[in-house]
Image (cartoon, rainbow, N blue to C red):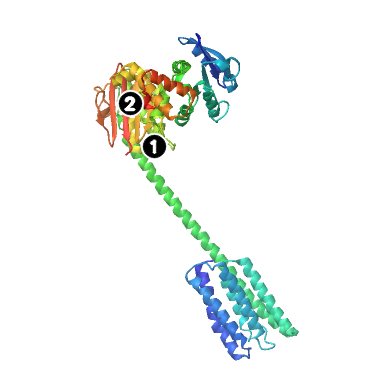
Amino acid sequence: MTDHSRAVLLAVAAVIQPGLGLAPLLDHDHHPAAWAAYVLFALVTLVCAVWVLRREPLPGPVVAGGVVAVFAASATATWALPPDDHFGPAHWSFGLVGWQLLLLLADRVGPLLAALSAHVAVSVAQWVSAGAPDRVEVGGAGVVLLGVTSFQVGTLVIMRVLARAGRQAARMAAEQERATTRAAVAEQWEQDLRARFAGRLGTTLPLLADLADGVLDPRDEETRLRCALAATQLRRLFAEHDDVPDPLVHEVAACAHVAEQRGVVVSLAVSGVAVPVPAEVRRAVTAPVELALAAARTRARVSLLRTDGEVRVAVISDAVIPGAVLPDAVIPDAVIPGHEGTAPGSVEVETGTYGGQTRMEVRWRAS
Amino acid sequence: MAGELSAVVVDDHPAVRAGVAYWLSTGTPPIRVAASGEDVRAAWLGEGADADVVILDLHLGGPTPALGDLRRLVEAGRRVVVYSMRADDDIALQCLELGALCYLTKAEGAEHLVRAARAAAEGRAYTPPSLAGALAGDRSDHRPALSAREVEVLVEWFQSESKDFVAQRLGISLSTVNSHLERIRIKYALIGREAPTKAALVARAIQDGLIGVDDL
C-alpha cells in the first residue's frame, strides 16, 4: 500500500469522525460512555497519524493495540446507543470503525477482511441481543450494512490495484534504467578495448603491411623474430582480459605457450604466494618476457618468483637478441643485452649473456 | 652400508615405479630398487624395510598428501625423498619440516631424482630448483634467516636450473654453490622438528665445517 493511499485513509478517518460522527452523537440520547468511545476512536486516528505522516509502516504492536481499541470503542459505542437505533441515523460509530480498520490493516488484507467481518458480526450480535428486530428493521439494517461495507471493501480493492500497478511501473522503470546502464557500460568497454588493442597493435600492423607488400622476406631471420614477437604480444594481449585468479602467471604462461608452438622446449616454474599485480605493471613485466621467448631458439626456462614484496620473472634461454637490427619500437631500450634500465614504474629489467645463455630478469617491487 | 645403495619406491602408478627403478639403475653408481609397491607398506616389510632411501609419492590414490606416512618413516630413522606430482610450495616446506631430505616434483626429471636419491642414501639433503623456489618464496614467520648470498643462490638456482650457470653468474665455484645450498638446508633442518635423519644431517654439517657447534 502506498504512502499516498494511507494518507487518504487517514484523512477519511480524521474527517468522518467529527464530520459524520459528532452530529448524531449530539442529536441523539446516548449513554455517556459513548463519549469515551469517541475519544478512543480519536486516539487511534492520532496514533496512526504519527507513522503515516512519517511515511513509515505501522509497527505490529501498534496495529494490534489499535484493532483492540477500535473493537472496544465500537462495542462501547454500540452498547451506548439509544434503544432501537442500531444501524439507524444514531449509530454514528458503525461506518467509522470500518475506515479505522482499513487505516490500521491496509497492508494486511487477510486480517483486515477478518476484522471487518468480525466487526459486522459483533454489531449484528449486539443488535439482535438488544431485542428481536422486525422485518422492516432487518431490511433497513441490511441496506446500511451492505452500503457501508461494500464501499469500504471497494476502496480496499481500488487501493490494492493502484499499489500493484505502481509497483509494476517502478519495477519496469528500474529495469529500463539498468538496461540503459548496461548498454552504456558495454559500449564504453568495447571502445576501451578497441583503443587498447589499436594501441598495442602498433608493431603488428606495419609488420603485416610490409609482409604483404613484399618489403620483408619471411625467410629472413629478423623477419621471423619480429613475427614470433608479434604473435607472442598478441597472445598475451588476448590473455590480458581473461578472468583468472593469477593474471601474471596466466599471461606469462600464454607467452610460453606461443614459444612451445614454435618448437621451443619451455619449462615454466612458479613459486611463492600470488600477489595482485596491476595491469600496467603486468604489461611492463611481460614485455621483456615476450621478447626473450620470441627470440629463444630451442629451449627456455621461465620462472616466476614472488618473495616478500617483490615479483621476479626470469627467462634463461639460448636466445640471441639482435638488439641492433630491430627497430626501437619493437624492443624497449632496457631489454637490449648488457643494458640495464628502468621501465615505467618500479619495474627493473636486467639482461646478460653467460656462456651462450641469455638471461633476462624483470623485477617489480610491490611497494 | 655394504656396497650397493638400495631404494624402495612407493607410488600408486606402476609406470612411475618402473620408470624410477630404471632411472636409479642407470645412475653412476647405480641404485638398486630393493622393493616397490603402491602403498607405504612396501617400505616397512621385507626387503623394503632395509632399503637406504624411500622414494615416496605424496599423493597415494587420494587428494590428501600422505604426510602422516612421511612423519612415521622419518621418525623410524628412514631417509625419505618425497616425489610429488604437485609443485606446491606449502606442502614442500611442510615435508622439509617433517624431515624429508628432498621434495622433488615429477616434472623435474631423472637427473634430479638420481641426485636426490644418492644424496639421501648418504643422509644428505638435496635441493632441486623447484624446492629452491619454494624456499626463496617462503614467507612463514618461523623461516630461518638466510644471508643475502644464500637467497641469491636459491633464486638463481630456481631461475636457471643449472648450477654451472649460477656459479658463472655469481662468480663463485660450483662447490661454493653446493655448500650454500647445503647450509640453507641445514638452517631449515635446525628450525624443523627433531628427527633422527636431521640429527645426522646436522652432525655431518658440523663434521664438514659447514656450521659450528655455536650455530646450534
Q: Is A150 rendered above or below residue A324?
A: below
Residue A275: image tag: 1
Q: Which residue is mark 2?
A: B152
User: Which chain is indicated by disc 2?
Assistant: B
Badge 2: residue crowd in 10 Å (few <14, some 14–19, many ≥20):
some
Residue A17 horizontal/vertical position (percent): 56, 81
- The chain letter under disc 1 is A
> Based on the displayed image, in which of its 4 quarters is residue A103 positioned?
bottom right
Residue depicted at 45% across the width and 52% down the height: A178
Residue A312 x/y as whole percent? 34, 30
The quadrant the C terminus of chain A occupies is top left
- Same chain assignment for discs 2 and 1: no
Evaluate whether residue B61 shows in this view.
Answer: yes
Disc 2 marks which amino acid? Answer: Glu
The residue lying toward the viewer, choosing from B136 and A164, is B136
Q: Work out whether A264 lies above or below A235.
A: above
Badge 1 crowding class, 10 Å Cα cut-off, few under 14, some 14 to 19, many 20 or more, is: some
